[in-house]
Image (tube, rainbow, N blue to C red):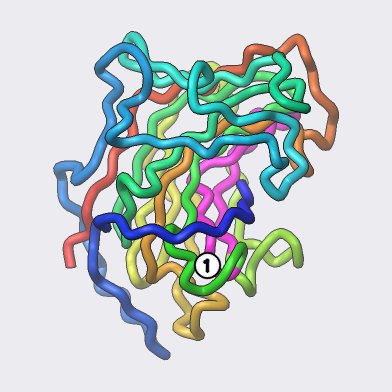
Amino acid sequence: MRAFIILSFLVVGLNGFSQQKDTIADKQWKFESKPVWADEFNYTGKPDPSKWGYDVGGSGWGNNELEYYTDKGNASVANGMLTIEARKEKKGDKEFTSARMVTKNKADFLYGRFEIKAKLPTGKGLWPAIWMLSTDWKYGGWPESGEIDIMEQVGYDPDSIHISVHTKSFNHVIHTQKTSVTNVPTATSDFHIYRIDWTPYDIKGFIDDRQCFQFKNTGKGFAEWPFDKRFHLLLNVAVGGNWGGQKGIDESAFPGKMEVDYVRVYKMIE
């Protein structure tokens, strides 16, 4: 997902390590075996407020999206699962509602392994995403401070899973974004594990533990690699938008639900 909201907050990060040199060495970093932060969703009710906040509103979010993101009702936990539900219902001047959950101000991370087990919604016009944005926007607004897309999918092409990064030099606006597209025929019927491993050397993307993406740190500065600052996680289901709405919206698809079994973050071992 893309974002143009610029906010700066101070929250405890995962790792204090920062590097930007002309030559970046691959030190074969490993990750701890126990999560440093996780939500297993083994409770009932609203998502844990100590772990999750919300982006709220119907601004279009830089993508001409058609939903109004709420902070209640569209995200719930039951039977060991988080459900984010896009609905056909009016809110403000929008005809749809959904939720965009964020860990910003509650858990921000610099490097690590990020693993999410999820089942994606079915329906043309839906646009689910599991992704990360800069917390402090030290290099400027989007795309200067970067974006990491752990998983994106659009309902009109449900078997195609996209893993991407966006930076000043590499982004979809100038058609230079770094993306892998992987065919996952059961993305909407089964749970799959979406993961990135983020180190000072590179960002690797995995689906069900199979690597399908790599973006290396060139050492040429923030325009290519802004990923030496803290980022936070986002989970959302958009409706319509510049990408998600390209083939129209199937209103019979609502409510559209993304289910999440767990979110786990593992600290990088320096």
Whether residue 162 is in magenta: the answer is yes
Q: Residues within 10 Å of mark 1 (few under 14, many from 20)?
A: many
Percent of width and height locating residue 262: 33, 28
Residue 135, above or below 49 = below
Q: Which residue is mark 1?
A: 145
Percent of width and height locating residue 15: 23, 62
Find residue 241 and report its image quarter.
top right
> Is residue 244 at all visible to an observer of this figure?
no
What segment is highlighted magenta in the picture? 144-166
Query: Is the C terminus in the top left, top right, bottom left or bottom right quadrant?
Result: bottom left
Q: Residue at x 55, y 49 (%)?
A: 163
Q: Residue at x 48, y 80 (%)?
A: 218
- Tell whether 17 sits left or right of 161: left
Circle count = 1
The amino acid type, in three-letter code, at marker 1 is Ser
Q: Residue at x 70, y 66 (%)?
A: 176
Residue 188, above or below 28 = above
Q: Nearer the viewer, residue 121 or 2?
A: 2
> Is residue 123 at all visible to an observer of this figure?
yes
Q: Nearer the viewer, residue 163 or 39?
A: 39
Q: Residue furthest bottom?
A: 22
Element at label 1: loop
Whether residue 68 is in magenta: the answer is no
Q: Residue at x 66, y 29 (%)?
A: 68
Q: Residue furthest front?
A: 92
Percent of width and height locating residue 134: 46, 59
Find residue 53 and report its image quarter.
top left
Q: Nearer the viewer, residue 8 or 113?
A: 8
